[in-house]
Amino acid sequence: MKETDICIIGAGPVGLFAVFEAGLLKMRCHLIDALPQVGGQLSEIYPQKPIYDIPGSPGVLAQDHVNNLLTQIEPFSPTYSLGERVEAVEKLEDGSFITTTNEGTKVASKVVVIAGGLGSFEPRKPAIQNLEDFENGKGVTYMVKDPEMFRDKDIILAGGGDSALDWTIHLAEIAKSLTLVHRNETFRGAPDSAEQVFNMANEGKINLVLKSNIVKIGGNATLEEVNIADHNKEETVHKADYLIPLFGLSPKLGPIANWGLNVDKNAIQVDTFDYSTNVPGIFAIGDINTYPGKLKLILCGFHEAALMAQSAFKYVYPEQKLSFKYTTVNGVQAF
Amino acid sequence: MVNITVEDKNGTRQDLELPTDMGLSLMEVLKASEYNILATCGGMALCATCHVEVLEGADKLPELNDPEYDMLDTLPDATPDSRLACQLRISDEMEGMVVRLMAEED
Ligand SMILES: Cc1cc2nc3c(=O)[nH]c(=O)nc-3n(C[C@H](O)[C@H](O)[C@H](O)COP(=O)(O)OP(=O)(O)OC[C@H]3O[C@@H](n4cnc5c(N)ncnc54)[C@H](O)[C@@H]3O)c2cc1C
Ligand code: FES
């Protein structure tokens, strides 16, 4: 069990900055995010777009902004669980919390801050009827965490974006056979990768199936075969140990809806005094919350983080009185 | 003004009369008509939560631009007549068009 003062769910810009505001008040933070990287929407959806309305940083690229935040919070040594989705938040009798992820990681904390944005980023799934029967280690997987898992296996990849191309190139070396299924005739991803994939197909290193879709999958207990239909709806059956659909990610509110919080239209209702929820000790900041006049902007989330920290202090140090100080007075006291 | 028909997830159709002189995108009009689409990226062809399938009148629309094509190419459920509503400006060519919402929230 990991122990910390504040467990922050969501490592988008607002969750990251919350580490800074908490750190100024000597509170330690652990961050959890479903994505394998920090930065939330900024690094997942628009890393190369300039943001113009961050005070004092005109026209900063989204990914640069995330990197700046990481530098800013470094003195407070936050810890991370990335690539894990929070499933449950449990309140104990003494008022503290246990937060549990889908990988079984448990974090004990005095305060929980939900900075979950639009929800956790989940893979887009193709409409194949019994897809879910083969998830969770039975052959269908949406993320390549450990490539070794695919050594000497028959793999089918589906998708046409950059990640489908990159993984095709990478896994072809390891797999016994690799088939890439794509709906169109051409790839719009990075031209270099696309060319490499076509070359590999010509050399017989991979099996490229274009203008086709996966229509059916089957097997006893684990995945054994995949049916691919071409544009004339003619089906062929392919032997497969693994199917990896790679169609990008999209945010889903997910488990947050089940934690006993007041939720309105996919957002958590908060008190604007300190962005507390209806459960004492749980706060919600950034895009995930809602209140009259709410604007889903990064700078609004930063403001919410500052006020949240003032109230969170009372849970972490109930005996102490908080006196307000500028960073210019004491600087940043690392820990 | 131009008239189009929108079909939601449940198959319910509604006719909309839309102004062509305000430079609005189909995504903005759908949001204003209270359809529950997220349009997370605000119209930058980066999120695909404004994905629609054009059931009638697809041939009269302007060609897909590169960012739109790239985004659609990554989706599992795109069809040859898929478009991103945020990349379609309301225009006279849309008269009689029928679109189906592909990414409506519950
Ligand atoms: C294309 C685009 C352009 C934008 N431009 C601007 C702009 O110019 N200026 C501006 O101020 N804002 C802009 N925004 C909005 C801005 O990106 C958001 O306001 C900001 O990302 C909110 O930050 P956040 O930390 O609250 O949430 P997010 O960035 O959404 O991060 C939330 C994180 O929480 C994680 N999470 C959620 N639930 C769970 C769970 N159960 N378990 C584990 N992890 C979970 C998610 O995976 C995600 O990484 C833009 C947004 C987009 C999409
Ligand atoms: S609104 Fe995001 S792609 Fe159209």
Image (spheres, rainbow, N blue to C red):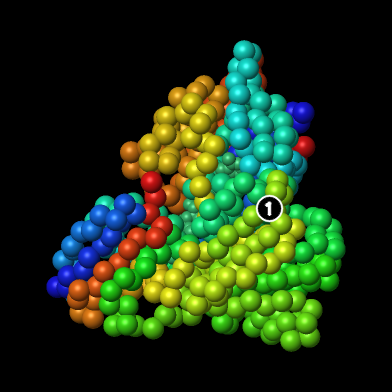
Quarter residue A229 falls in? bottom right
Provide residue A48's location: percent of width, then percent of height.
58, 69
Q: Tag 1: Cα neighbours inside 10 Å, few (<14), some, or many (≥20)?
A: some
Provide residue A100's location: percent of width, then percent of height.
67, 32
Residue placed under numbered mark 1 in the picture: A219
Q: Amino acid at mark 1?
A: Gly
| Chain where mark 1 sits | A
Residue at image x 26%, y 62%?
B6
* Whether residue A191 is situated above or below residue A70 in the rendered picture: below
Quick one: A205 or A15, which is closer to the camera? A205
Residue at image x 35%, y 60%?
B101
Quick one: B85 or A183, which is closer to the camera? A183
Provide residue A159's location: percent of width, then percent of height.
60, 68
Quick one: B45 or A23, which is closer to the camera? B45
Provide residue A47's location: percent of width, then percent of height.
59, 64
Residue at image x 62%, y 13%?
A93
Residue A170 vs residue A96: left or right?
A: right
Is residue A160 visible in the rendered image? The answer is: no
Quarter residue A270 falls in? top left
Whether the residue under disc 1 has CB within 8 Å of ligand 1: no
Residue at the far top in the pictured view: A93
* Whether residue B103 is situated above or below residue A85 in the rendered picture: below
Residue A299 vs residue A17: left or right?
A: left
Residue A80 vs residue A158: left or right?
A: right
